[in-house]
Image (spheres, rainbow, N blue to C red):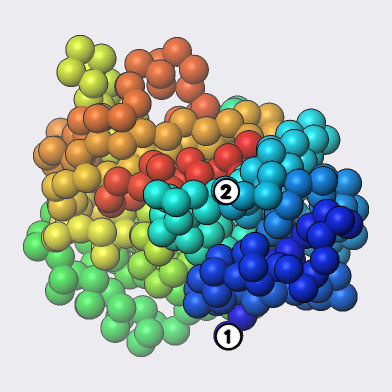
Amino acid sequence: MTNFGFIPVASVLQDESTFPDIIGEYTAELEQRGGQQWREADLSRPEPLFYFVVTGGTEQKILTLREQRRRLAPDEPVYLIAHPGNNSLPAALEVLARLQQDGAAGRIFYLGKDTREQTHRDIVAAVQGVSIRHTLRQMRVGLVGDPSDWLVASSPKAEVVRQTWGPTVVPVDLETLIRAIPRIPAAEVALVAEQLRAAATEVREPTTQDVEAVVRVYLALKQIVAERRLDALTLRCFDLVTRLHTTGCYALARLNDEGVIAACEGDLVSTLGMIWTHQLLGAIPWMANPAQVHEADNTLWVAHCTVPLKRVKSYRLRSHFESGLGLGIQGDLPLGPVTLLRIGGTRLRKLWLAEGDLIRDGYAENLCRTQAEIHLTQGHVGELLRAPLGNHLTIIPGHHAARLRSWWQTNVA
């Protein structure tokens, strides 16, 4: 199976018959990792493409090939492979400098004597990154109701989401959901509600009716996902509290568990962060508010009334914190390494990225129900106070900042 193509580019002074002598050992290694040598006639193929700089004097030729390729794959980063001989690296440096001057994203993969194995791993990761970029371009993200009124820095236009990140935003009138909720069959609601209650370690405030109401929201949203062919969504959830005295907390938690990224409050920016981490890392993301920060010891408390149930060791069913109505989820998250991020800016090209350790859960009654204290080991909580990008963070298990930053620098920044 071909995972990517590489097209050797050499000076006009170099006969193609000499390629095996110059780069034969490198091409064999690339082929072992799913690569295939291409010719110019293959430029229209859909797999990611690398330009293998065989010799110097190839700068103009690479620019010409890239322009031909750009007409067919406009979002593809420019990936150059260089080796230690034949002025390959100087040519790669020159051509990437020119392409970056023109606004193109890209990088050089250098097959140095001591770095070849790592470079091959980087190439494989880059192939995955391009595939994810293509997947993002195909995705449909439902905006169920308008963004919440308080998201004054987190309500990008649909065209900005499309241009910078790729997904198409699909507006869904909140009335569509509200009309669907009472139509869900009672027998289906009862079955899911019983499963939800049975798996909880405690049901404190919510009544049987409260539990069944949030299950109806979940099943109605799931219907909309299927009907509108949505890959992800974000919900103006507080209108459910004020109009129906129920919540979307369980619905969003359950959809995330099922692989449909679902964010709160109509926050498209956080939805993108959650989609990105899910696609790149296969992790289930958690969206939460930074509730408290402590600069002296570089810690923060994060909290929200929903959390994917697959992310927690156990959970209790509580009321929604701000309103005291409906149902919120109080989960116990596993301790250990985590990565935190926030996308932002008018064109969604800014990024706050940090790593740390989740050191304890919390149960304060003046915060949203699921709470966690995180100690940052990379990044500083003070940055949130001095240059915030918004009021929600995406949190995923494990330390992944380097991988996320690498993808970001090549595909977005």
Q: Which mark is residue 84?
A: 2
- Which residue is at a point 47% across and 36% down the rendered structure image? 342
Residue 212 lies, with reference to residue 237, above or below; the image says below
| Lower sequence index among marks 1 and 2 | 1
- Which residue is at a point 63% across and 36% down the rendered structure image? 413
- In the image, what residue type sits under mark 2? Pro
**Quick check: 204 left or right of 195?**
left
- Which residue is at a point 73% across and 42% down the rendered structure image? 91
Nearer the observer, 410 or 337: 410
Percent from the top left, x then y, of residue 288? 36, 41
Question: Is residue 149 at all visible to an observer of this figure?
Answer: no
Residue 97 lies, with reference to residue 178, above or below; the image says above
Nearer the observer, 25 or 158: 25
Percent from the top left, x then y, of residue 180? 56, 71
Percent from the top left, x then y, of residue 184? 48, 79
Q: Find numbered disc 1 in the image and state the secondary structure of the residue it sits on.
A: loop
Percent from the top left, x then y, of residue 312? 20, 58
For the N terminus, the quadrant is bottom right
The residue beneath circle 1 is 1
- In the image, what residue type sits under mark 1? Met
Distance from the alpha carbon under mark 1 to that under mark 2: 29 Å
Toward which corner of the image does residue 217 lie, by quadrant?
Answer: bottom left
Residue 199 lies, with reference to residue 50, above or below; the image says below
